Image (spheres, helix red, strand yellow):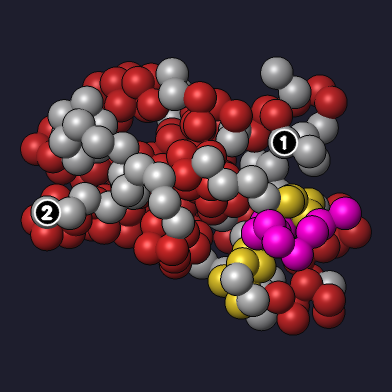
Amino acid sequence: MATQDKPVLHGYFRSSCSWRVRIAFALKGIEYDQVPIHLIKDGGQQHTEQYKTLNPMQQVPAVEIDGITLSQSLAVIQYIDETRPGPPLLPADPKKRAQVRMISDIIASGIQPLQNLHVIQKMGTEKVQWAQHFIDRGFQALEPLLKQTAGKYCVGDEISMADICLVPQVYNAERFKVDVEQYPTIKRLNETLLEIEAFRVSGPSCQPDTPEDLRA
């Protein structure tokens, strides 16, 4: 049962946007409750009248925190960063901060929505090719940018919101059989980040609603 003193994440195990929020909570060391919203079962539980009151866009995540409900993952991450102690998720330097936001927006606005469930469901037998096309298109832009900004992580040597966005997107790329070897900087960063516990424990293979056959 969800308790009121903890944030409540309404999400789905394989949702990129939900995963981003889980990573941010883990990096900040924040305990939270989860309410699974199955995006396919019963026609999609995100379409129920009850859930629409939490997120009128009928998407995940929705996060109940501090007496408000937030529904866009980047807004949630920045709210967490601004209101909770722990490692900062945005750099103090304005230029690096802008680079983090740029990379995050490329992924969250320019790549991921085009292979989101409600989009690819409309594509029928072409859904894999559609997803591959737009992920490749985005990665072709992202790779040279990351070559310029990356140190150990996406922007310099500190973990940021950009890294939080990158890992779920690479997971999606691999799921849709995109050849990530074409993007050595993206591949290196993803491998480095997956060595960090906060990224691993937040992943799709170990959530409360992960199906048994997909558990690791």
Q: Residue at x 46, y 39 (%)?
A: 27
Q: From the top left corner, tell me how far across and down residue 82 is, in percent.
A: 38, 63
Q: From the top left corner, tell me how far across and down residue 4 is, in percent.
A: 75, 64
Q: Point out the frontmost of discs 2 and 1.
A: 2
Secondary structure of residue under mark 2? loop
Mark 1 surroundings within 10 Å by alpha-carbon count, few (fewer than 14), some (14 through 19), many (20 or more): some
Residue 207 image label: 1
Would residue 36 appear left or right of 164 to someone viewing this image?
right
Q: From the top left corner, tell me how far across and down residue 29 is, in percent.
A: 53, 41
Secondary structure of residue under mark 1? loop
Residue 7 image label: none
Q: Nearer the viewer, residue 200 or 189?
A: 200
Q: From the top left corner, tell me how far across and down residue 156 is, in percent.
A: 16, 36
Which quadrant is home to the N terminus?
bottom right
In the image, residue 187 above or below residue 9: above
Q: Residue at x 83, y 76 (%)?
A: 50
- Mark 1: amino acid: Gln
Q: CA distance from mark 2 to mark 1?
A: 35 Å
Highlighted range, magenta: 1-10
In the image, residue 202 above or below residue 19: above
Q: Nearer the viewer, residue 215 or 122?
A: 215
Residue 93 image label: 2
For the question of whether residue 108 can be seen, the reply is: no
Q: Report which quarter residue 175 is drawn in.
A: top right
Would residue 198 appear left or right of 211 to someone viewing this image?
left
Q: Nearer the viewer, residue 144 or 157?
A: 157
In the image, residue 61 above or below residue 138: below
Residue 11, magenta (yes or no): no
- Mark 2: amino acid: Asp
For the question of whether residue 63 can be seen, the reply is: yes
Q: Residue at x 59, y 35 (%)?
A: 202
Q: Residue at x 81, y 23 (%)?
A: 213
